[in-house]
Image (cartoon, grey):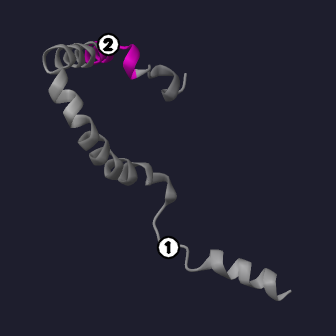
């Protein structure tokens, strides 16, 4: 049996279920007790999430500048032929 088959999904473990429960509980109490504050903070939360998404979503692009200009040279050669 390979190593990937022995690992389970984190969210289906008891620890993951506890984390999900805590997230829902905190969200519920924030909404019921501090609804006005949560609604006032939503535009700022969205603005703050944008840079974080930009940083963490660009992981798969690789290191910029490490291709030694190969991408540009292949398009230049096609135009010369």
The residue that appears at 32% across and 13% down in the rendered structure is: 17
The answer to whether 43 is drawn above or below residue 15 in the figure is below
Is 13 contained in the magenta span? Answer: yes
The residue that appears at 20% across and 28% down in the rendered structure is: 38
Along the polypeptide, which appears first: circle 1 or circle 2?
Answer: 2
**Left-right relation of 1 to 33:** right
Locate residue 29: give its quadrant: top left
User: 10 Å neighbourhood of mark 2: few (<14), some, or many (≥20)?
Assistant: few
The answer to whether 42 is drawn above or below residue 75 in the figure is above
The residues colored magenta run 10-20
According to the picture, the residue beneath numbered tag 1 turns out to be: 66
According to the picture, the residue beneath numbered tag 2 turns out to be: 17
- Of residue 5 and residue 81, the one placed in the foreground of this image is 81
The residue that appears at 72% across and 84% down in the rendered structure is: 76
Which of the image's four quarters has the N terminus?
top right
Which of the image's four quarters has the C terminus?
bottom right
| Mark 1 secondary-structure assignment | loop
Q: Residue furthest right?
A: 81
The residue that appears at 32% across and 49% down in the rendered structure is: 52
């Amino acid at each position: 049996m390979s190593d990937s088959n022995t690992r389970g999904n984190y969210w289906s473990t008891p620890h993951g279920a506890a984390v999900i429960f805590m997230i829902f509980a905190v969200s519920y109490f924030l909404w019921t007790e501090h609804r006005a504050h949560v609604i006032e903070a939503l535009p700022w939360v969205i603005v703050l999430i944008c840079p974080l998404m930009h940083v963490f979503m660009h992981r798969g692009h690789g290191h910029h500048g490490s291709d030694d200009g190969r991408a540009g040279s292949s398009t230049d050669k096609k135009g010369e032929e």
